[in-house]
Image: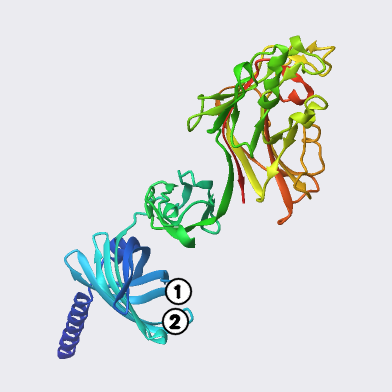
Amino acid sequence: MKKGLLYLFVLICSTAMFTSCNNDEKEIFPVDEELVGTYKGAMDIVLDKLPIAAQLPKNVNISKAGDNQIKMELKDFVFGGMNIGTITIDRCDLVRSGDVYSFTGSQTLTLLDPIGTCPVTVKGTIGKGNLKMNIDVDVKALNQSVQVDYSGVKLSGSEKTEAKITAFTIDNALVLEQPVINEEQGTITFKVNETATADDLKAMAPTLTISEKAVVNPASGVAQDFSNGKKVTYTVVAENGTVKEYVASIAGNLNVLSLPFEEWTSVGEGPAMHDEPLPKDLLASSVEGAALLFLYGVEGFPVYKTNDKVAGESAIKLVTMDTSAAANSLVPALVSGSVFTGKFDLKYAFSDKLLCTRFGVPYTKKPVRFKGWYKYTPGEKFIDGTDYKDIKVIAGKKDECSIQAVLYKVTKDDEVLTGHDLNSSDKRVAVAVLQDGTAKANYTEFDIPFTLLDGKSYEAGAKYKMAIVCSSSKEGDFFKGAGGSTLILDELEVIGE
């Protein structure tokens, strides 16, 4: 009996010693506490010994697969236009070396078509918040091999998650339509002057604003090549590794009808000498008719060259003249300063003054915007000189300026709109009109989109004319306004496509 109990005791001790040895051999690592998490990093990719990507941003997820094993997951692995899919190694065995662990693992994965089934092996080190590894993918279907070198750091979970370009601008006069960001499609498009050369388009340097604590590549302010239809991919990486790509490109070319008021000519002699804006085949003004008023004792002119400008050397100053003291059947009670695209025809000066203004020049584009700069000071005394025999002073009324562009359709080259029908003709198709004609002490920029009139549409191939008409008195065509009202204009442009 005693011998049986002794045998049982020895057997129990032996079993305990064996179990204890096994537990010592199976070491338990602090996988959950130290290793598990998301690692933010970048990878270099080599395809059949040919480098095809460097420092490509990517996150890797590490989770626990066992007491001394981890699971590695690299989601949505895309490079060079090829979608490998998600690479997952379910079990990577860990080997401790101080406070860092080395690991290896392999798995045969079925990835997205046409990749199909391919063996994947991984080896690396992890610990102290760092992850480094090499991944080999044998893409048998394509008879190619992919090698990935990855290095990343463990995230805390409190990092910013947004990866966006919130603003994208290009400070270049050739960019006529600033970039538009389409967040949903991940595109950024802009339009340039059709005169831009390939060299011009290689020197575009966008300025970017991005999400807080994110980084972007290429960097803001670095010149990019947009010539010959090239596209530039901007990659934004959030603090937590979230990646968003935007593809920037030129969406089209635009045409500019420009009125910088830089060229002038002196016309006439003696008291009739005055300046007129050039070119004459584009611009006309009320000074051409008003210059004859000196014959009736009227001094001064409604149009002047001025060095009070926004850019260049000069601008144009339009001044409303109160001529009521000399008003008669030939001299109007009021002459507003005006400039317009078209012709001033003196042959109507003594019969129908509104027919003198022949508005419009041929225009072959679809107008998009009317822009420029102006400043305006209204005169003190507003008069109604519609009837030169009964001129009225309108107490309390303030003068306003007028700035507008009108696209109208014609069937013959000699068709024009005049002071009679500029604002009423059925030939009008689209307009861009400044709504605020009140006083502006300092230069003020305007940028007005063209609006199609009711029932009208732009027809490619049809004949059109563009009338840009600006006046120091909004009702000057009815001989209403305030003497001394002054409108200064510079850098007018019609943008067309």
Q: Are marks 2 and 1 in contact (CB under 8 Å)?
A: yes
Disc 1: which residue: 83
Residue 124 image offset from top left, x and y in percent: 25, 71
Identify which residue is drawn at 74% across, 15% down: 397
Whether residue 243 appears in this view of the structure is no
Q: Quadrant of residue 423?
A: top right
Give 332 or 234, whichever is nearer the viewer. Answer: 332
Label 2 and label 1: CA atoms lie apart by: 8 Å
In the displayed orientation, state which residue is furthest to the top: 325
How many residues crowd mark 1 within 10 Å: few (<14), some (14–19), many (20+)?
some
Disc 2: which residue: 115
Whether residue 181 appears in this view of the structure is yes
Left or right: residue 387 versus residue 160 is right
Mark 2: amino acid: Ile
Against 254, is 141 above or below? below
Q: Which image quadrant: the N terminus?
A: bottom left
How many residues crowd mark 2 within 10 Å: few (<14), some (14–19), many (20+)?
some
Identify which residue is drawn at 65% across, 13% down: 299
Identify which residue is drawn at 77% across, 38% down: 417
The kind of secondary structure element at disc 2 is loop
Residue 289 image offset from top left, x and y in percent: 71, 25
Residue 166 image offset from top left, x and y in percent: 48, 47
Give 252 or 316, whichever is nearer the viewer. Answer: 316
Residue 111 image offset from top left, x and y in percent: 44, 79
Give 211 or 7, whichever is nearer the viewer. Answer: 211
